[in-house]
Amino acid sequence: MSEPVLQAVSQPEARRAVARSRAYATFARLFDYPDGELFEDVRDGTLAESLRSVLAEVDPALAASGNWAALREAGGEPDDLAVEYTRLFDVGSSGPPCPLYGGLYGGARMKTMEEAVRFYNHFGLSMAESPRELPDHITTQLEFLHFLAFREAEALEGDDDPGPFQRAQRDFVSRHPGRWVPGLRARLEKNDPMPFFLELVARLEDFLAHDARHLVALAGAAPTER
């Protein structure tokens, strides 16, 4: 997915949309495989501080809670975080114990992926040919919300209608990551994870719930499915 760009923001609601977009982008980066630069940014606290800072821009209450020290715990050895990521999210005799693919929570994975693709295509986005770019992978979904929040900010800043982007975010959060990330957290709690991963998912779950409420306040409740 392409990276949106917004040069300057003056409107308060547009600034909030930009902060929300940056929060989604930061979460997406934290769910990448933790090697190289990402590992160093975790170990030295760069990413924890970036996440806390941007969440505070969205709402100070989001940054006031949580175990921020856990998001700086990369383990005693250089590959500890990567080994744990693989154990939790990538391997297992029947699949990983805590998959990062939303379609694996609640069944009907093909239907879940097809619906996500319809969202992406509606906004002119297409999928890269990479396993981690599957439409139900957590980074794909968070990057899409990053994109939509930027489009919302652009509309607000340009005095255009932000409604289509706000409604799309509302619906996508509730139907995709907001639906299955609580299940991911529940699975993590049963698999004795490193504190970093449990806290990361807890911060994301809280942010998604907060954003869902914010989007309903902006765009109204989603239409009832028939």
Image (cartoon, helix red, strand yellow):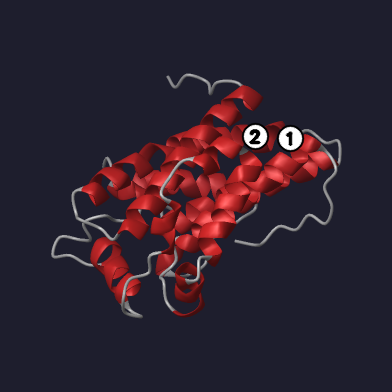
Vertical order, 104 against 207 (above or below): below
Query: Quadrant of the image for the C terminus?
Result: top left
The residue beneath circle 2 is 166
Label total for image: 2
Q: Nearer the viewer, residue 189 or 101?
A: 189
Q: Quadrant of residue 157?
A: top right
- The answer to the question of whether label 1 and label 2 lie on touching residues, with beta carbons closer than 8 A, is yes
Element class at badge 1: loop
Label 1, on which residue? 162
Amino acid type assigned to the residue bearing label 2 in the image: Gln
Residue 8 at x, y percent in the picture: 84, 52
Q: Amino acid at mark 1?
A: Pro
| Other residues around mark 1 within 10 Å, as few (<14) / some (14–19) / many (≥20) | many
Q: Nearer the viewer, residue 95 or 38?
A: 38
Question: On the rendered structure, is 159 left or right of 72?
Answer: right
Spot occupied by residue 160 in the image (x, y as percentages of width and height): 83, 36
Q: Is residue 100 visible?
A: no
Q: Position of residue 97 (x, y in %)?
A: 21, 56
Locate the N terminus by quadrant. Answer: bottom right
Q: Which residue is at a point 70% across and 47% down the rendered structure image?
A: 18
Bin the neighbour count of mark 2 within 10 Å (Cα to Cα): few under 14, some 14-19, many 20 and up.
many
Residue under the point 51% across and 71% down? 41
Residue 35: image x %, image y %? 42, 77
Q: Is residue 207 visible?
A: yes
Q: Quadrant of residue 2?
A: bottom right
Viewer-side residue, 17 vs 40: 40
User: In the picture, residue 83 is in which quadrant?
Assistant: bottom left
| Residue in view at x 76 percent, y 40 percent | 14
Measured Cα–Cα span from mark 1 to mark 2: 6 Å
